[in-house]
Image (spheres, rainbow, N blue to C red):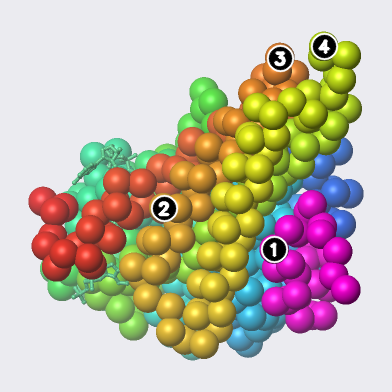
Amino acid sequence: ATTFDPHDPLGIDDLLTPEDLAVRDTIRRWAADRVLPHIAEWYERGELPVIRELTRELGAMGALGMPLTGYGCAGASAVQYGLTCLELEAADSGIRSLVSVQGSLAMYAIHRFGSEEQRQRWLPGMAAGELIGCFGLTEPDHGSDPAGMRTRAKRDGSDWLLTGRKMWITNGSVADVAVVWARTDDGIRGFLVPTDSPGFSAPEITHKWSLRASVTSELVLDEVRLPADAVLPEVTGLRGPLGCLNHARYGIVWGAMGAARSSFESALDYARTREQFGRPIGGFQLTQAKLADMALELHKGILLAHHLGSRMDAGTLRPEQVSFGKLNNVREAIDICRTARTVLGANGISLEYPVMRHATNLESVLTYEGTVEMHQLVLGKALTGLDAFR
Ligand code: TGC
Ligand code: FAD
């Protein structure tokens, strides 16, 4: 007979294979040892001081470019990659961001659209966490509408000269290689820019009140000279960067539920022990309604993530389905964190508990990788056949 598990009320673990559970446990243990003891301090200081060590350790666990094959990548399933994102974001969205950008954006772009030489040059070091990558699509004046980008690559003999600015780029100041999307005479192309190239700089963006334990930067490209073979040969047009985004957004569908789980568990724990009016606040009907509603959305969200993961593994996942998941799970996760915060009362605003940190992190997650509104419009277009973007 099965028993009711408050941590897995729907029995979702039964959908996971022994290998899935082993991956999940490894990442959960690593996050508990290496991130949780320090994260409040890093967050308060607005730094990720040991990013190189963490990246190497993530590489050693196979977490970088996890579902990719060859070149030192783990070749794991999409579900295993998703579980990894969930466990990392249960620690902090900044750590999941590091892994999303490295694996699903920078490495994926090189793996999917790069030449054999580019793959050989960059991927083994990136999979091992020896080299860090970033992905520059957004510009100061073009966020949701990257089709309008101004960054330009023009030919100079057989070389390329890259000029422009990218904004809000995760890992930018610590990266060894930047995947930069730029306009050319033939359309939008991707370029691999070693960050020690003359004319490249990446000043860090400060004063963030969200994703504080994550490096976010501007990329400045001032006539950066690149050889002919710096361009990703296998794609032209916006479908290049947008194809990469499908993978990163998929990871966020799972990741957001990690932040939500951590906040829910804090609230559940607190509700069982905190007493007011002579009894635990978890015994009051209003608190139970909050806990029940949070549990519903949390486990529905994980079930949705697993469903999308199974489709990705089967090769049947559509971009619109990724939008469905990203829109729903990030929106519900932030709602869970905000409700959890109320259960903790004044302690809810303290960094002694993870809840407010997750809630403020999710403000970024709500915006990056396509805002709520962009995913509503993607779904709106798929439902009606009418394009409402412009
Ligand atoms: P549209 O005309 O619809 O499409 C242009 C071309 O792209 C193709 N396409 C896709 N391909 C693959 N996957 C998708 N999801 C795709 N969506 C569109 C499309 O088929 C077409 O191809 P082709 O060959 O026919 O030319 O493009 P649009 O200009 O109307 O824009 C559509 C829109 C608004 C949905 C798109 O621009 C968009 O998604 N905007 C949001 C931008 C965004 O998400 N930026 C994210 C930057 S990276 C980031 O935030 C990293 S966060 C870091 C972290 O995780 O820590
Ligand atoms: P805008 O596009 O200016 O949007 C502002 C508001 O207008 C939003 O609410 C938007 O939904 C709404 N809006 C816009 N157009 C429409 C419309 N047609 N209909 C209705 N509403 C509309 N980018 C990268 O390329 N690489 C990264 O590594 C990266 N990392 C990031 C890390 C952080 C911490 C953050 C905060 C952002 C990061 N981004 C990155 C940028 C992110 O992808 C963009 O912020 C996002 O795509 C939105 O662009 P924007 O901020 O310019 O907002």
Few, some or many C-alpha atoms within 10 Å of disc 1 (few <14, some 14-19, many ≥20)? some
Q: Secondary structure at mark 1?
A: loop
- The mark lying in front, picked from 2 and 1, is 1
At x 30%, y 78%, the residue is: 235
* Quarter in which the N terminus is drawn: bottom right
Name which residue lies at 46% across and 60% down. 325
Going by the numbered disc 1, the residue's amino acid type is Leu
Instruction: Tell me which numbered mark, 2 or 1, is placed earlier along the sequence.
Output: 1
Q: Is residue 150 left or right of residue 225?
A: left
Q: Which mark is residue 277?
A: 4
Give the residues in magenta: 1-27
Determine the CA span between mark 4 and mark 1. 33 Å
Label 3 vs label 4, nearer the camera: 4
Vertical placement of residue 353 versus 374, above or below:
above
CA gap between label 3 and label 4 equals 17 Å
Seen in the image, is 49 located left or right of residue 184? right
* Residue 256 appears left or right of 127: left
Q: What is the distance, in whole Å, between disc 2 and disc 1 at their CAs?
A: 22 Å
- Which residue appears at 61% of the width and 50% of the height? 296
Taking the image in four quarters, ligand 1 sits in the one at bottom left
Looking at the image, tell me whether mark 3 or mark 1 is earlier in sequence order: 1
Three-letter amino acid code at the position of disc 2: Leu
**Label 3: how many Cα within 10 Å (few below 14, some 14–19, many 20+):** few
Disc 3 residue type (three-letter): Ala
Q: Around disc 2, counting alpha carbons within 10 Å, would you say few (fewer than 14), some (14 to 19), or many (20 or more)?
A: many
The residue at which mark 2 appears reads as: 327
Residue 302 locus on image (x, y percent): 61, 61
Residue that badge 1 annotates: 10
Mark 4 residue type = Phe
Front-lying residue, 226 or 79 = 79
- Secondary structure of the residue carrying numbered label 2: helix
- Provide the residue designation for mark 3: 346
